[in-house]
Image: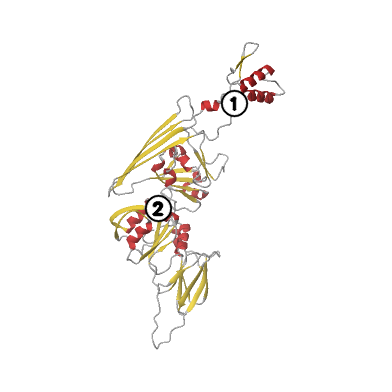
Amino acid sequence: MKKNEEFERKSPHFLKSACLALCLVGYGGSVAYAESSYANSTLLTVQMSGRSIKDVFSYIEKNSEFIFVYHGSNIDVNRKVNVDVTDRSVENILHQMFDGTDIEYLVNDRQIIVRRKQAVEKSIPVPGVQQEKKIIVTGNVKDANGEPLIGVNVIIKGTTKGTVTDVNGNFSLSDVSPKAVISVSYIGYQTLDIPAKEEIKIVLKEDSEALDEVVVIGYGVQKKADLSGAIATVPTKVLENRPVLNVGQALQGSVANMNVTIGSGQATDSPSFNIRGTTSLNGGDPLIVIDGVVSSAGELNRMTPTDIGSISVLKDAASAAIYGSRAAFGVILVTTKTAGQEKLTINYNNNFALRKLTSMADVITDPYMVASTRNTMSYPWYNLYNADQLAYAKKVSEDPSVSPYYLNPDGTYSYFGSTDWFDEAYKDLSFSTNHTVDISGKTDKLNYYFSANYNFQDGMVKYGTDKFNRYNLRSKS
């Protein structure tokens, strides 16, 4: 299937959501813009001169989570445009591209629907000629299973006047000639032509040929994949702004139903992943795919978090239809960054952090209380301390200047000190830092990305060497 002949996205679920978004677009308007926190908060820098509309679309998709939907036969995606903006919203970029043209667009969260403006025909009365009485056509569109179809195109055949069905499959057309023919069309279903009347009940049949053209991309998927099922996308800012040692720690708490187990907590320990809980006697680790190559949790955790361009988590077992039985416990799709600008770009990122133990035990250090508690716990089998030893422990408790060593009659010593051994073994705070620099750029023949990372983490143990240093180098072209 060629992209210029059918919609860019081929997932049936995506197409339905796209059609639902079309319900929000009024015919004849120049711009339709739905409120979206992502669209409002995402700023892009685009510097492209003499490039096609399709190239600009591809660039925006690669450097954001936006997805374009358009019909190639209605839009000239090869038309050359000049776009030069810095830190501007996608609405501003599209306004530059299509201002003064017959193209309109809808920004609905991360979906951008682009189409030609729909003109509304108006009848012009002619003096002395009796005007035909118009009717209002209302109706409902369902599929063969009785489910309402959302976003179905309903137009008066031979004109550009029309509408789309709402969430319940209902539609309404005013000022319709009784002699008109209503054409009903929907992606994946056979087009149906019906004579106009005031109330119409329509059942559309699936078009098997159109359904055969729907494809699902396997390892080539790079973001929120063209797959059916539960999919979650992790924003790159989650990975960049957390002062963590590895990707596993950065992903902790970022995706619903994905559990990250840190393990021993050692700097060299690799966190493990689990989606939807333990579903097998063997555990059930998700399949991890990095840039189209099957990898491991250890390889993912050794990556520099800022090198990651996007992460998509496929939660349900539907992904096993593409990746095989290894994907039965979910899939984590990872793509690394590529050059975002045509000119040479250098980025430097760092963070500094102080850590402390969050679950330290509240230690009792009073010598007399410790000795008495030990005797109580050992009763009735034996007593660790006799009356003379308890009396000495109480004396040490009341006067810390008294020696904690008690000389027993047999020549041995009993210790009644008040040392907090947890405090002796662990630091109150430890320091860690992370530094990353990357260089990227692209020309007509070369696209390059190079990054270097240094990570240092000081341990929590006071005595002995407990320091971790990691150096990462990564290149991509």
Q: Locate the C terminus by quadrant.
A: top left
Crowding at mark 2 (Cα within 10 Å: few <14, some 14-19, many 20+) = some
Picture coordinates of residue 117 (x, y %)?
38, 67
In this view of the protein, which residue sits in the foreground, 38 or 75?
38
Tell me the distance, in whole angstroms, between the alpha carbons under discs 1 and 2.
55 Å
Residue 451 quadrant: top left
Q: Count the marks: how many?
A: 2
Q: Which mark is residue 42?
A: 2
Picture coordinates of residue 14 (x, y %)?
46, 57
Q: Which residue is mark 1?
A: 365
Could you tell me which secondary element the residue under label 2 belongs to?
loop
Look at the numbered discs 1 and 2 and tell me whether their residues touch, using CB distance below 8 Å. no
In this view of the protein, which residue sits in the foreground, 291 or 321?
291
| Amino acid at the residue labelled 2 | Thr
| Amino acid at the residue labelled 1 | Thr
Above/below status of 121 relative to 100: below
Q: Residue at x 37, y 56 (%)?
A: 89
Q: Locate the N terminus by quadrant.
A: bottom left
Left or right, 336 with respect to 194, comes to: left
Most distant residue in the right direction? 380
In this view of the protein, which residue sits in the foreground, 207 or 75?
75
User: Please, which colouring scheme is shown?
Assistant: secondary structure
Above/below status of 339 relative to 373: below
Crowding at mark 1 (Cα within 10 Å: few <14, some 14-19, many 20+) = some
Picture coordinates of residue 93 (x, y %)?
35, 58
